[in-house]
Image (cartoon, rainbow, N blue to C red):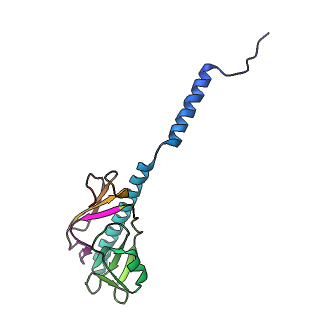
Amino acid sequence: MKIKQAGVTLLELMITLAIVGIVASITLWNSSDILKENRAESFLLELKRNISYARSQAASTDEIVIVCPTDETKMRNSNSAFSCSKEWGSNKIITVFVDVDNDGKYKQTTDSLLRVMEQISEQDKLTYKGNEDRLRFNTSGRITTNPGNFIFCPNGGTENNKALTVSQSGTAFYVGDSIEKCD
């Protein structure tokens, strides 16, 4: 007669504990760094798309197109006009508009608002190292302001910073990881 065993072998127990340990480490793993990196990359890629759009609009319509930050409250409270902010920083909304009278300010009566990006959160910071408060595209699609780098710092810190470079020709290049810090 054969004796039937009721239980598990030591090998089965060790494999089960190893699988449970791996699953537990994955679920308890702190993924905040990956979320910061994804947020920074996503924002800069969206900014790159808006800069490329502004460049193509300027070249195809033969009009001046501006990409600039503005305060959310000023933009939302003033439906008819707003001006560019002096800094890209946090709590800003990046706008793209046609500047018909070439004064660097949006006026609903003469200018066309093309795009509005989502607001930069309070915890994040964006700087532009081009010494300008806006990007101005002329009718050839080139920028007439200083070229430079956008640096996005998630949580305003020094880790997981990402960069986007804008050339004099108006082309935006996503650089990725950066050791530069937001000022």
Q: Residue furthest right?
A: 1
Q: On the rendered image, what quadrant is the N terminus found in?
A: top right
Q: Which residues are magenta?
A: 125-144
Q: Against 142, is 20 above or below?
A: above
| Coordinates of residue 162 in the picture (x, y in percent) | 32, 55
| Coordinates of residue 156 in the picture (x, y in percent) | 34, 58
Q: Is residue 31 left or right of residue 10?
A: left
Q: Is residue 37 magenta?
A: no
What type of secondary structure mainly makes up the magenta span? loop
Residue 165 can be seen in this image: no
Residue 65 can be seen in this image: yes
Toward which corner of the image does residue 93 lie, by quadrant?
bottom left
Q: Residue at x 36, y 90 (%)?
A: 109
Q: Residue furthest bottom?
A: 109
Q: Against 155, is 59 above or below?
A: below
Q: Against 73, is 41 above or below?
A: above
| Coordinates of residue 34 in the picture (x, y in percent) | 42, 49
Q: Is residue 99 left or right of residue 7?
A: left
Toward which corner of the image does residue 104 lie, by quadrant?
bottom left
Say which of 7 and 122 sits in front: 122
| Coordinates of residue 55 in the picture (x, y in percent) | 29, 72
Q: On the rendered image, what quadrant is the C terminus found in?
A: bottom left
Q: Is residue 108 left or right of residue 6?
A: left
Q: Residue furthest top?
A: 1
